[in-house]
Image (cartoon, coloured by chain):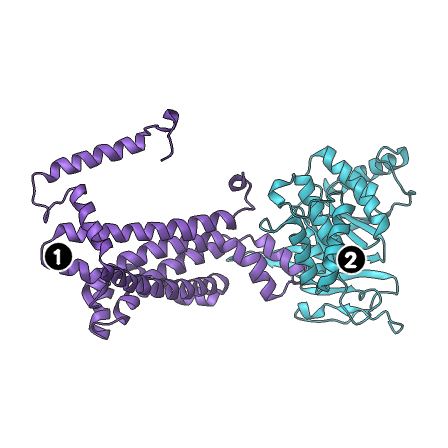
Chain colours: A purple, B cyan
Amino acid sequence: MTSVEPSEIRLSPGLLTIAAGLVAWQALSLFFPPVIFPGPWTLLQRMAAIYSDPASYAVVAQTLRRIFEGFAIAMVAGTAFGLLMGLKRDVELFFDTWIMVLLTVPAVCWAFLSVLWFGISDIAPILTIVLIVFPFVVINIWEGTKAMDKDLMEMGSVYRADRSLMFRKVIIPQLMPYIFSSLRIALSLSWKIALVAEAFGAGDGIGQKLINWFQDTRVDMMLAWGVSFMIVMVLVDVLAFRLWARRMFDWRPQLAT
Amino acid sequence: MALGARSIDRTHLRPQPTVRPGPTLSTAIAVHNLTKTFSKPGTETQFVVLDDISLSVEEGKFVTIVGPSGCGKSTLLNIIAGIERYDTGSVQLSPRRGSPTHQPRVGYVFQSPRLLNWLTTAGNIEFALEAQNVPGQQWKERVTRQLEMVGLGGQERNYPLRLSGGMQQRVAIARALAIEPDILLMDEPFSHLDAITARKMRFDLMEILAKARPTILFVTHDLAEAVFLSDRIYMMKTNPARIFKEVAIDLPRPRKPEDPALLDLEKNLVQEFFGVLEGTG
């Protein structure tokens, strides 16, 4: 045990709010059965049960794999396509409307369609993720190419930089903020869609757990799975992107200090 | 034309090539009857950016084009740099020193530094070296030497946004010099700097150029700057965008900006310049 100096124990307003919320939540939950409205304590116990069951990890791994596959496909294809639309006027004119159309299709429609087309399978949730995330990434990268500094492009061509050098040193670095925001939007979208898609058409994974517990009207277990998975995704976001982003943008004075 | 003075022709940049006599042996840049018009998108109005411009710059000379903003000076530099099209006339650059079949190396210093802020100062210079296919083993030595030459020795690993505006422009100059240019184009490189920094930069530029002697075509709206720096000046006006006078500055170097002979010359040129611009000359 290490001793804690009194000065280190400080109650920040944020912590106080959370504590108050938990107390209120616990109090409210006393009026309902836990399967309808579980309190935080019950939720913790259910989560502990999930974590202590080795089979849970296979379920999480299954869902994570689908998320990352869909996410990766959507990111790579979306970035490439966004770049193409930003740099080639013909492509932009041709696909402009189609990307907008793609954006307006409700997520549930894709989930249903994918299941109808591909049945209960791996393809359905991955395809759903790709179809929904792809246009978001395209639009973001496309905006990024519009914001690029024409003067720097001109500088590159004055010095006769070839296409590869221009991409590596002039274009991609300018798009990095857009690529980063796309990554984060894409990831958070992907995992939300993944659960919906799995619920409809995967036969396993966390989405399937949720729908099973839903059919048993077990809100406590649904929440336990949902919150557990939220924690995993927040960790991924913090570790993968925020830390990486801080390193990537080291050249910006305001972040370097 | 015959004796190794073969010129690199930029006629591919315009639709109707017309053959013009090439530059003489010592001419680095030859522009003949250059015209460029620009039609505003969506309108029929033709806007004449450059109207029958002819000029030449001899090898190793410092030649300046002085003119008001919007007279097409930057466009002219861009055409010479090969990144902008033109309608009629010709632009010819003599080939790289010692290799008559190669395009000359052209360095360009812009009004703003135009550095890649995500690369270190060394990275920015290396960008130009890589673009110009300079062998990698020469990079380190050239970067160190050029940064020292512009007074930024030891700043290799610093990022541009941590440098002052004047220092950033020095990096841009180092980048242009690092490719060991045959021709150096400078587009109002000191106009964004405060007067004191700009003055210091002009002195330093003179010193740097005494060592590495590229052919320079410099553009400015500042007559005092032009007179101080140049061997020769072309004066340009707008509507139509034409060169209306050519002046040789035969004063010895090193020069002082306060030299009475220089100030006299400047005063006369200012009078003539504004006379033409305001339509009384």
State the residue in front, A44 or B30. A44
Q: Which of the numbered marks, if any, corresponds to residue B274?
A: none
- Quarter of the image where one finds residue B280: top right
Where residue A103 sits: x, y (%)? 31, 60
Amino acid type of disc 1?
Phe
Q: From the viewer's perspective, is the residue at label 2 or at label 1 nearer?
A: 1
Q: In this view, does B197 lie to the left or right of B266?
A: left
Q: In this view, does B196 lie above or below A153?
A: above
Q: Can residue B37 be seen in this view?
A: yes
Under mark 2, the amino acid is Glu
Q: Position of residue A16 (x, y in %)?
A: 27, 31
| In the image, residue B244 above or below residue A209 | above
Q: Which residue is drawn at 83% across and 44% down?
A: B206
Residue that appears at 86% across and 38% down: B265
Of residues A9 and B138, the one nearer the viewer is: A9
Gap in angstroms between the C-alphas marked 2 and 1: 73 Å
- The residue most toward the front is A1
Image side of residue A250 versus residue B274, left or right: left
Q: Is residue A203 left or right of residue A257?
A: left
Q: Is mark 1 on a helix, strand or loop?
A: helix
Q: Nearer the viewer, residue A224 or B40?
A: A224
Label disc, if present, on residue A214 of the rendered structure:
1
The residue pinned by badge 2 equals B180
Circle 1: is it few (<14), some (14-19), or many (20+) Cα within 10 Å? Answer: some
Extreme residue in the top direction = A6
Residue A98 can be seen, yes or no:
no
